[in-house]
Image (cartoon, rainbow, N blue to C red):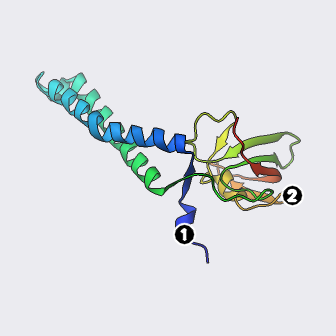
Amino acid sequence: MVDSREENVTWLTQEAYDRLKAEFEYLSGPGRVDIAKKIEAAREEGDLRENGGYHAAKEEQGKMEGRILQLRQLLDQARVGEAPRTEGVVGPGMTVTIRFAGDDDEVTFLLASREESGSPIDVYSPQSPLGSAINGKKIGERATYTLPNGRENTVEILEAVPYIGG
């Protein structure tokens, strides 16, 4: 039986975790205080219906609250370190090379959280349609997934090796 909590785990490096935690702490503390001051200052300018500064500050507050929720969920589900990996099997933390059906071009990317910025190669999320389709597949296997436009696409796994960094 598969532990459903494992599917929601986001593996992060210590550096990425620390950076996201610091962003969360700023936004949920001093960031909220700063935006509240902006809203109050704009409110004092008078008529709120025609107050561009007030509406801009409220919109900024909404975006900030959304990011706080996103960070809280990410940090709650994060595990620091490296995901358990088996060479030749696609999983988070692996550098994967695929070939699209009917195409000779190969694409190589890191299968990891998009929050893992700083990677010298493209990063694809394990929760993306492609990431979900190839997760757990072995070299030589094919995976089919649905594109946003509703069409299906098939890829062949050419390589899956632990990401070393760069």
The disc label shown at residue 4, or none:
1
Say left or right for 157 vs 25.
Answer: right
Which amino acid is tagged 2?
A: Gly
Q: Quadrant of residue 55?
A: top left
Q: Where is residue 112 in the image (x, y as percent from the top left)?
A: 63, 48
Assign a secondary structure to mark 2: loop
Residue occupying the point 84% across, 57% down: 139
Crowd rating for badge 1 (residues with CA inside 10 Å; few <14, some 14–19, many 20+) = few
Residue occupying the point 17% across, 24% down: 42
Residue occupying the point 78% across, 54% down: 154
Crowd rating for badge 2 (residues with CA inside 10 Å; few <14, some 14–19, many 20+) = few
Q: Hey, which residue is sitting farthest bottom in the picture? A: 1
Say left or right for 105 vs 48.
Answer: right
Question: In whole angstroms, how far apart are the C-alphas of marks 1 and 2?
Answer: 27 Å
User: Foreground residue, 43 or 137?
Assistant: 137
User: Foreground residue, 65 or 161?
Assistant: 161
Residue 141, relative to residue 37: is it above or below? below
